[in-house]
Image: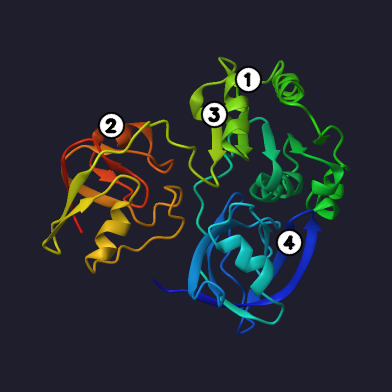
Amino acid sequence: MSTIPVVVRKKWPVAADIVALELADAHGKPLPPFTPGAHIDVHIPSRQAGRDFVRQYSLCNAPGETDRYILGVKREPDSRGGSSAVHAEVHEGQTLQISSPKNHFALHGDASRAVLFAAGIGITPLLAMAQALLQERRAFSLHYFTRSPEHIAFSGQLQALESMAGALHIHTGASVEGTAQAISTALHGIDPSSHVYACGPAPFMSMVQTCIDDRLPSTQFHVEHFSAPASETTGDAFFEVIAARSGVRCGVAPGESIVGALRRHGIEVEVSCEQGVCGTCLTHVLAGQPDHRDVYLSEAERAAGKQMTPCCSRSLSAVLELDI
């Protein structure tokens, strides 16, 4: 997979536990253009972990700015290594490798109005959307929920949105009930041709979904996941996986991923998020019934059972044969 070398031109704090990175092409060339809601894969070297991490981060500057990319990275308390490495080990002047922008969370141009809901670090893709909508003079509102004023990220960019009356609404320290009420109020009397976009923790996005209820068709509600919701499965059963192209058959223990089991037998599957979000490891299913635990595939794709994400999904059948 080809990558783009970039230099960390600037790194600075933008909120409690959140830093921003400004990346520029290492050779001074324009970066690939991107659309609002896009993200990039960032290869993060970590001396402490002794390995590189590949993580996805949304681009939060205004589309059209190809001289730089701006990312926001929150230090996660249960970090699997990526966010901790960004905060502790990535420095200004350092060269990183990134992918070209990808977008699974695009704005819809036919909407009469866009309503944006962000919680915490979920502001990053919606900030790019808001800046694009402002430039295009399209009607929108952005509702941003944070724990406290200290957790409001990118306040400078947000101030520009205040010039558009009614566009920006910041909610700090709201209770669960208060958050639900604020979302419901924002959706009251919504134009039926509007589109709603949400990014944040899974419970927050479920709350937005509940408040939408029957106000809009599901095709007009769009979400961006930073991680897959916790599985509701109470227990994992042992099963066997067959890597058809590699000629390997091995067991997958409870609590072990398919990727991990295959790695024990010398088979490396390309992964990135390792949570079923990005689709990097998407694999064809040749036989067996997958137990889908991702947020990448659509409901129709899951029902078809022809593809799966072996980084997090498992098997409902005793044997699962994959095109690996």
Are circles 4 and 1 on residues that touch, CB within 8 Å?
A: no
Distance CA(mark 2)–CA(mark 1): 27 Å
- Figure check: 78 above or below 211: below
Is residue 41 left or right of 151 when viewed as pictured?
Answer: left
| 10 Å crowding of disc 4: few (<14), some (14-19), many (20+) | many
Q: Which mark is residue 211?
A: 1
Mark found first going from the N terminus, 3 or 4: 4
Under tag 1, what secondary structure? helix
Residue depicted at x 32% and y 58%: 260
Residue depicted at x 61% and y 82%: 26
Residue depicted at x 20% and y 59%: 324
Residue 17 picture location, percent across and down? 74, 55
| 10 Å crowding of disc 2: few (<14), some (14-19), many (20+) | few
Is residue 113 left or right of 146 when viewed as pictured?
Answer: left
Distance CA(mark 3)–CA(mark 1): 14 Å
Type of the residue with mark 3: Gln
